[in-house]
Image (cartoon, grey):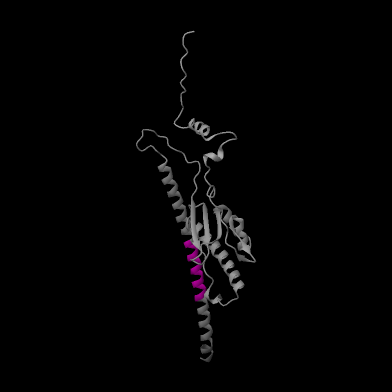
Amino acid sequence: MVRTLRSAPHDGALASDRRSAELAAIFVATERVARLFGKLSAGLRVRRLRRSIEQALALNRKQVRPDGLCIANASFRLAITWRAREIHPWDCDLPYHQRLRRLVNQTFSDTESALERLFGALPEVDTIDLKVLEADAARNGTLMIGSVSRSEFERFHPSSTAMRLRLVGVDYNLVDSCFEPLALRPAPGANEAPVSGLDVLGPGESRTSSKRTRGLGEGGRRVWHQPRAGPH
């Protein structure tokens, strides 16, 4: 009787461990099934989207023609902008430069995770054009910008997250291991001043002659009438 009572707690611990192992196996199996179902669903979405494009390019619903436009290439881009997160409130008591470095590491990790989830959730998207703004809503400085293709993102897997983002096409600027907002290039011609007609006059050319010259290209072709020659 005493021997049976002593073995009861040990049997209970074994049963608890067995139950935990069974739950862990069920969780892993559920994750695999969900992942497989997600891949099948993504494949169906891509095929449905391609079929819709092919139907749109058929061009033969109201025509008595069996031919249509044949797809040579098709790609989808996602343009997205988000604002970086502030560091965790528990880290707000750290020194200033340490907080800035913590923000850099957190932004790198968040960007990599966001790209992975976006490519996984949108299998039809081939390229993501991203822009990451500063965490402060009162400032709109750009911390990161780039165009990331699915093939390159799946190909590069270095140990450094910052290096992976750089390899796949994400641009950022670090000064003393802290973010420096990027100076974006202005649009072509945005800073060009209008050129007046006097600025393009050649040497010795007057405004009147310039107007005549410009008039040759206005209103289509002009016909110059010459007086008819009389009898000789």
In the rendered structure, does residue 49 fall within the stretch colored magenta?
no
From the top left corner, tell me how far across and down residue 8 is, in percent.
51, 86
From the top left corner, tell me how far across and down residue 41 is, in percent.
45, 56
Q: In front: 175, or 199?
A: 199
* Any part of residue 171 in sight: yes
* Any part of residue 157 in sight: no
Q: In front: 197, or 111?
A: 197
Say whether residue 62 is left or right of residue 108: left
Looking at the image, which residue sits at the far left?
62
Looking at the image, which residue sits at the far top?
232
From the top left corner, tell me how far across and down residue 79 is, in percent.
49, 54
- The boundaries of the magenta stretch are 19-34
Please name the predominant secondary structure of the magenta segment in the image: helix
* Residue 55 image-quadrant placement: top left
Q: In front: 189, or 179?
A: 189
* Residue 173 image-quadrant placement: bottom right
Residue plotted at (51% across, 89% down): 5
Instruction: Count all numbered tags in the image, as a single digit.
Output: 0
Residue plotted at (53% across, 86% down): 7
In the rendered structure, does residue 28 fall within the stretch colored magenta?
yes
Question: Is residue 95 depicted above or below 199 in this figure?
Answer: below
Q: In front: 189, or 42?
A: 189
Looking at the image, which residue sits at the far bottom?
2
Residue plotted at (55% across, 57% down): 145
From the top left corner, tell me how far across and down residue 14 is, in percent.
53, 80
